Amino acid sequence: MQAITPTAQATERPRPNLKIGMATLFVILCWAYSPTGVHIALHDYGPAHLALLRFIVASIFMAGVALVMGISLPRLQDLPVLALLGLFAVSLHHTALNYGQQGVSAGAASVLAQTTPLFSTLLAHFVFKERVNARQWACVLCGLFGIAIVAGGDHGLAGLNPQALLIPLAALSWSLYFALQKRHCHRYSGLTIVCYTVWSGTALLLIYAPGLWQVALHASAAANLAVLILGIFPSALAYLAWAYVLAHSNVSRAALALYLIPPTAMSMAAIALAERPGLMVIVGTVIVLASVLALTLSPAIKQKTPSP
């Protein structure tokens, strides 16, 4: 290993904690706004049209960022993986979220969207054949129980909308995106991955293009403003800020900050949408967040070693 010279040490000083903290706060606020913005936009847009227009805005914005910052061209053999990243992180994830949020409140949606670690653990065991210990299984089962409480308690069991189950599907889709990115995209920078993920996902959403222009012309100013904010902040700038946080801080410690998103989202929904979460939603939220937090803090899942 090459020794680090004093000059190199001086140029590789850690970034100030204040910058990391501000970037983390920015990410939390952006992603906490997303459920509220989606609910506002859904008054005038269908779920598929909303997903497409949101990421057309994000794609245009990321194109400007790419021109200024510069990104590397993808290797030909990586194009299928980049397309899958766009499918799971953008097309499937956000279409499922939008349809799902037609059946639950913005606050409940923010909680259900934070269940990605549960599905990542299931994928690790059933797909990637990694060991999951008893503690992790207990966290997953408790988390799934919490999902049921949040979904059932939002409008009561009698008013349970099956569309709410699409939000855990969106979390599963995000888990697949994270697994693919972790295993296949180490040769690209964070900015490069964000750009190609957004662009490929938007290209896949173009199947919903018919009728979008007419809907946008007749949508209210509030709905169009919500789409614009969703496209620039949660869908573009927040991903860049999160890539910065992950590059300059401990990944596990940074991930803990994301559990502030549901209470922040509930506060935003209470102000903007006059939502008041019921007791069962609050109980389910505590169970879900405690489960995913315990799962995040549990020892890393170990890969199953092949038998001799």
Image: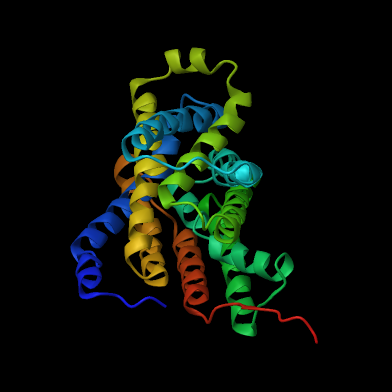
Residue 223 % position (x, y): 39, 26
- Coordinates of residue 75 in the picture (x, y in percent): 58, 44
Image spot of residue 155 (x, y percent)? 53, 49
Q: Indicate left or right for 142 with 14 as reference.
A: right
Furthest residue toward bottom: 308
Residue 55 drawn above or below residue 151: above
The answer to which of 228 and 113 lies nearer the viewer is 228
Residue at figure coordinates x 61%, y 32% from the top left? 204
Q: Is residue 266 visible?
A: no
Residue 95 in view, yes or no: yes
Q: Residue at x 35, y 65 (%)?
A: 257
Q: Is residue 273 above or below residue 257?
A: above
- Quarter of the image with the N terminus in it: bottom left
Q: How many marks?
A: 0
Identify the image quadrant of residue 181.
bottom right
Q: Is residue 164 left or right of residue 5?
A: right
Which quadrant would the C terminus be assigned to in this image? bottom right
186 or 297: nearer the viewer = 186
Q: How is the image coloured?
A: rainbow
Residue positioned 64% across, 77% down in the render: 137
Q: Nearer the viewer, residue 180 or 267?
A: 180
Which is more toward the observer, 262 or 304?
304
- Classify residue 7 as left or right of residue 28: left
Q: Splitting the image into 4 quarters, where does residue 61 fall?
A: top left
Q: Position of residue 268 (x, y in %)?
A: 32, 47
Q: Quadrant of residue 67?
A: top left
